[in-house]
Image (tube, rainbow, N blue to C red):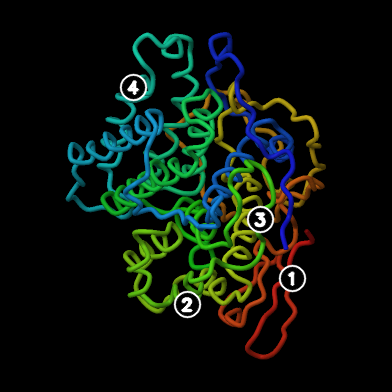
Amino acid sequence: MSHTLKGSQVSTIDDVSLHVFLTPTKRINDGEDLNLFLASEAYRDITAWILTLNRASFPKLTDTGEIQRLRLDDGSMVLSDGTQNVKSILVKLDGMISHAPPSTGPRRFGNVAFRAWYSLMEESADELLQSLFSPDDILRRNGLCDELKPYLLGAFGSAPRLDYGTGHELSFLALLCCLWKIGTLRSGEERAIVVGIIQPYLALVRRLILTYTLEPAGSHGVWGLDDHSFIPYILGSAQFGPAIDLKVPVGATPVEGSLRGSPSPSVVTNAATVKDLQDSNLYFAAVQFIYDVKKGPFWEHSPVLYDISGIKDGWAKINKGMLKMYAAEVLGKFPVVQHFPFGSLLSWERCSGLEPQPASFHGQQVPTQAPGKNASAAASTGTRAPWASGRSVLSNLETQRFRHPSSYCTYPITSKRGRWARPRLDQRVTPASSDQVSFASPPL
């Protein structure tokens, strides 16, 4: 069974030399703005970009019938100049950690030395972004770096709050999306982007979290998917999905089943197996980080991931649920996207085919008006992670799998492991027995 994606290609700039770039500004200040965001060109491009990376992460069926898996430890992966230049920025940022050693003084929460590291990044941001282009490239001179800078600075956590969450991760995805739109990153190298950029980014973020003990940004606690990240669970589950023909850039992706020989989702509870798989798969690399920072039984400190591990319909089913959950719990939550800035590449303009939604329950719980509605984006504040009170925003977007937030359970599962999961108020549950809970799935 598969679901056809429609209208899910990222829009690109035809002639960047003629394009007028803009310094991104904050536009989401209340519940009404949140609904407008869900009908914006930026929302369309961000979701299309994530879907593009997701599809590229599935195993590839070649002309000869051979199946090529995407592995993080693939030493034969060739990186283009654009991909290599972005990776080099991450290497330089990693090197800055040695120039901002952790403070040894008493502290209650995150280490204040992170602010020193952040200042080093901020001071180097212009130079780092200019390194993406040749000295004679017109893109260095026409305001592009000013448009990219807020996304770079918002991608590594909040210096004032000493935290990191999925909103910061979203900012990095937005940076890559902008580079795709202007042609620095190109079609055909999506797999190289996952291996050569996204995985090094996640590794750097984890080092920052450990070095400076960064707090989760608005975490749900044990009832969240992950304290800090989301994208590795989307792309990592795709890595173990059934093989697809990647020659077709936009098309059906599986919604159930797994690649033959892939590990069972249930092995997340086996620490030794997780350690063996962490170097080749994003999902298990993320789970390994949980093992590194949390103690006790897996089902106790990560009940949502534990419940997901009981799904019997394969990794593609998990991937489908992760996409829906991301739309609802990240893109559809005001605390996550309220600081997201909009410029010319990720535009606040209304997207043809997407309709603004009436105020939802969740929208009614956020401010109706905030001062400085069009204030410049404060990149250092970043955005919080998704776990805030209230329900998601309803939508009637039916043209692609990456759905707008729904008031149904955001993760469609039916699992025997559900006995450890505590359903939220926006979940419909029907006890199947004393030790089993079935979570109702959203309609497709």
Residue 404 place in picture, x, y as percent: 72, 48
Query: Hey, what amino acid is under mark 2?
Result: Trp
Dots 1, 4 in contact, CB < 8 A: no
| Near-viewer residue (166 or 87) | 87
- Judge whether 151 appears above or below 56 on screen: above
Instruction: Specify which label sits upstream in the sequence, 3 or 1.
Output: 3
Residue located farthest toward the front when viewing the structure as drawn: 64
Amino acid of disc 3: Lys
Q: Furthest-bottom residue in view?
A: 434
Residue at disc 1, secondary structure? loop
Q: CA distance from mark 1 to mark 2?
A: 21 Å
Which circle marks residue 242 in the picture? Answer: none
Does label 1 or label 2 sit earlier along the sequence? 2
Q: Which residue is mark 4?
A: 131
User: How far apart are the two marked residues, 4 and 3, measured between alpha carbons?
Assistant: 36 Å
Which residue is label 2 attached to?
A: 299
- The mark lying in front, picked from 4 and 3, is 4
Residue hosting label 1: 440
Q: N-terminal of the two: label 1 or label 4?
A: 4
**Sequence-wise first label, 2 or 4:** 4
Mark 1, other Cα within 10 Å: few <14 / some 14–19 / many ≥20: some
C-alpha span from label 1 to label 4: 49 Å
Image-based side of 145 in relation to 311, left or right? left
